[in-house]
Each structure stands twice: as structure tokens, then as C-alpha cells.
């Protein structure tokens, strides 16, 4: 019991530190906040934040399902959403890994294997990347290949690093935890059983839909906040450009929140239909709204949980 209390205390301290980094990030963001307070911009800003907040909260559903498939432990939604939204705040800590490590608090709470929680997170990342790549290819078509050719050195480096990490990690695990690794492989192959296929497809579909909806929040910033004239024939194209810029920023190491990478990719793809100032400012505004959405998701979940707990006492 004492250990759980200490772990909870440490978790609360780390979360508090993460919130301080969130505040610091807001102050460091190069944006004129008066833009967000203009009368005509308040409604689209509220809508964009509601969209982002909703996705932050709902994203725990496919992750919760993946944890269940791997561990066969049915996790209460309250526990899953609490851990998920809390760890989501930790992504603002330097290192960009604490959000994934924080999810393993679920293992401590529910008695689930840490490897199952970690692998569920790995599957989530793979599905998110696949969904973003799929939408990018569909929306942008030939432009995707041009971007990959432009950044081929970066992609080659990423592939080499990924293969090296996977190979070395596998060798170390096999040598150090031979029996446990064999048991993990058995559980891994179980996720592809017939009974789980529909659930896996459902998770992928969720990420496809949520990724597209997030791109719509970017369009809200462009059209209703920055008042850019976007014709219907390039609407989907710009959505695809944003999704691809997010994807490349997400998978590029050393780029916290894709800063710098997103702007470069967006300019490369949409430079002929959007001016440079609009691209940079739109991404900065969306970054600010995303921070608010992340914080709101965490706060709403914690308040609702405390309210429900008081009602049940």
C-alpha cells in the first residue's frame, strides 16, 4: 500500500511539472493572443477546442481495447481514460517519451503486465502512422511521392534507426528474458486470432476517422480564424497536406511536437495555394488550441471522476 501511495505521489508531482511546462510553452509560443480574443474568432476557437478535447478523451477507447486484447483484462473506462489523459499531458515534458511511460501506471493499478500495456501503445502508434499515411496517399496522391523524395535522406535514416533498434532490442530481450519473450510471442500472435480481427479493424477505422477530424480542426483555423479563402477543390488537398506534415513531424526524432518539420512540409506541399505567413500562423494557432484541448481533456476527466466518486460515497 505504501508503495502505491509513493507511486501516486510521484505521478502527481510529475503531472504538476508537466502542467508548468504547458504554461511555459504557451508563453513561449510566438503568437499575438489578441487574435484569439477577437469577437468573430471565439466561436470557431471553441469548436476547434471541443473537437480536440473530445478526441483526446476518446482516444483511450482503442488503446483500452488493444490492452484488453493483449492482456485479457477488462479495464473500467474510468481507469483507462484517467491514465490516458493524464499521460497525454506528460508529452510536454522534455524527452517526448513520458506520455508513453506514464500509461504503464495502468499496469500498476490493474495488475496488468507492463509489456502488454507497452505493446498496446506500440500498436496504437503503428495504427496512427498507418492511418495518417493512408489518408495522405488518398488525399494528396502524387504529391506524397514528391515529399518522400524530397526528404528521402531523413526517411532512410529513420528506417535504419528503426531496424537497428528492433534488431538490437530483440536480441537483448531474447538473451536476457528468453522464457518471458516466448510467452510474450504467444500472446502477440493471439491478437491475430479470428475473434480479434474485427476489433483491430475497428481500432484502425477509429484512427482514420479521428485523424481526418483533426485535420478539419486545422481547416477551421485557416478558414474561420485566419479568414483564408479555401475553394472546395483544394479543401481535401490541404487536409491531406496537414495530415502528412503531422505524420512526418511525429516520426522525425528530435522534433518536439513536429516544430519546424510541419511548417517545412506544409510549405513544400501547399506553397502554391497558401502564403507562407498563413501556413506558419495557422500551425502556431492550432498548436495553442491543441495545448488547450490536451489540458481540457485532462481537467474534465479528473473533475468528472471526482464528482462520480463523491456521489458513490
Image (spheres, rainbow, N blue to C red):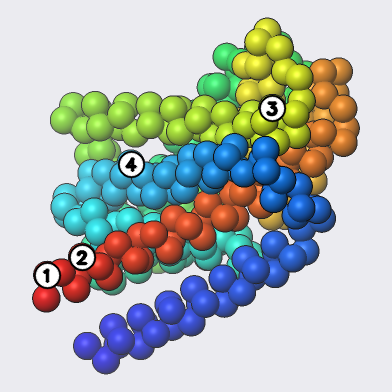
Q: Which mark is residue 218?
A: none
Q: Report the quarter where the N terminus lies.
A: bottom left
Q: Is residue 130 above or below residue 110?
A: above
x and y, in percent, of residue 198 in the image: 24, 26
Contact check, label 1 and label 2, Cβ < 8 Å: yes
Q: CA distance from mark 1 to mark 2?
A: 6 Å
> Going from the N terminus, do you reach mark 2 or mark 4 first?
4
- Side of 155 relative to 86 (left or right): right
Contact check, label 3 and label 1, Cβ < 8 Å: no
Q: Residues within 10 Å of mark 4 (few under 14, many from 20)?
A: many
x and y, in percent, of residue 45 in the image: 60, 43
x and y, in percent, of residue 121 in the image: 41, 50
Q: Which mark is residue 223?
A: 3
Q: Which residue does the numbered mark 1 point to in the structure image?
A: 312
Q: Is residue 107 above or below residue 275?
A: below
Q: CA distance from mark 4 to mark 1?
A: 27 Å
Contact check, label 4 and label 1, Cβ < 8 Å: no
Q: Which residue does the numbered mark 2 point to in the structure image?
A: 308
Q: Report the quarter where the C terminus lies.
A: bottom left
Q: Which residue does the numbered mark 4 point to in the structure image?
A: 62
Q: Residues within 10 Å of mark 2 (few under 14, many from 20)?
A: few
> In the picture, residue 216 is in which quadrant?
top right
> In the picture, residue 232 is in which quadrant?
top right
- Side of 3 relative to 35 (left or right): left
- Side of 133 relative to 284 (left or right): left
Amino acid at each position: 500500500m505504501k508503495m502505491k501511495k509513493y507511486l501516486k505521489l510521484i505521478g502527481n508531482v510529475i503531472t504538476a511539472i508537466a502542467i508548468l511546462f504547458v504554461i511555459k510553452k504557451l508563453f513561449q509560443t510566438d503568437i499575438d493572443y489578441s487574435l484569439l480574443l477577437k469577437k468573430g474568432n471565439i466561436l470557431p476557437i471553441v469548436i476547434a477546442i471541443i473537437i480536440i478535447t473530445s478526441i483526446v478523451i476518446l482516444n483511450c477507447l482503442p488503446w483500452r481495447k488493444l490492452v484488453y486484447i493483449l492482456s485479457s483484462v477488462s479495464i473500467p473506462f474510468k481507469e483507462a481514460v484517467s491514465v490516458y489523459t493524464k499521460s497525454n499531458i506528460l508529452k510536454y515534458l522534455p524527452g517526448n517519451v513520458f506520455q508513453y511511460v506514464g500509461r504503464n501506471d495502468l499496469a500498476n493499478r490493474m495488475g496488468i503486465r507492463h509489456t502488454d500495456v507497452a505493446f498496446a501503445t506500440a500498436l496504437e502508434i503503428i495504427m496512427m502512422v498507418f492511418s495518417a499515411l493512408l489518408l495522405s496517399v488518398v488525399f494528396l496522391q502524387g504529391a506524397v511521392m514528391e515529399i518522400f523524395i524530397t526528404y528521402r535522406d531523413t526517411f532512410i535514416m529513420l528506417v535504419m534507426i528503426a531496424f537497428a533498434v528492433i534488431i538490437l532490442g530483440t536480441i537483448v530481450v531474447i538473451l536476457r528474458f528468453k522464457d518471458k519473450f516466448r510467452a510474450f510471442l504467444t500472446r502477440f500472435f493471439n491478437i491475430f486470432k479470428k475473434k480479434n480481427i474485427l476489433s483491430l479493424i475497428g481500432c484502425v477505422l477509429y484512427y482514420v476517422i479521428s485523424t481526418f477530424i483533426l485535420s478539419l480542426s486545422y481547416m477551421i483555423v485557416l478558414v474561420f480564424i485566419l479568414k483564408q479563402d479555401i475553394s472546395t477543390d483544394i479543401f481535401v488537398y490541404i487536409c491531406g497536406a496537414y495530415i502528412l506534415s503531422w505524420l512526418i513531424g511525429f516520426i522525425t526524432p528530435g522534433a518536439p511536437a513536429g516544430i519546424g518539420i510541419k511548417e517545412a512540409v506544409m510549405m513544400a506541399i501547399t506553397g502554391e495555394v497558401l502564403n507562407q505567413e498563413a501556413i506558419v500562423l495557422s500551425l502556431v494557432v492550432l498548436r495553442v488550441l491543441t495545448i488547450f484541448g490536451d489540458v481540457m481533456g485532462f481537467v474534465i476527466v479528473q473533475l468528472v471522476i471526482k464528482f462520480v466518486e463523491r456521489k458513490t460515497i
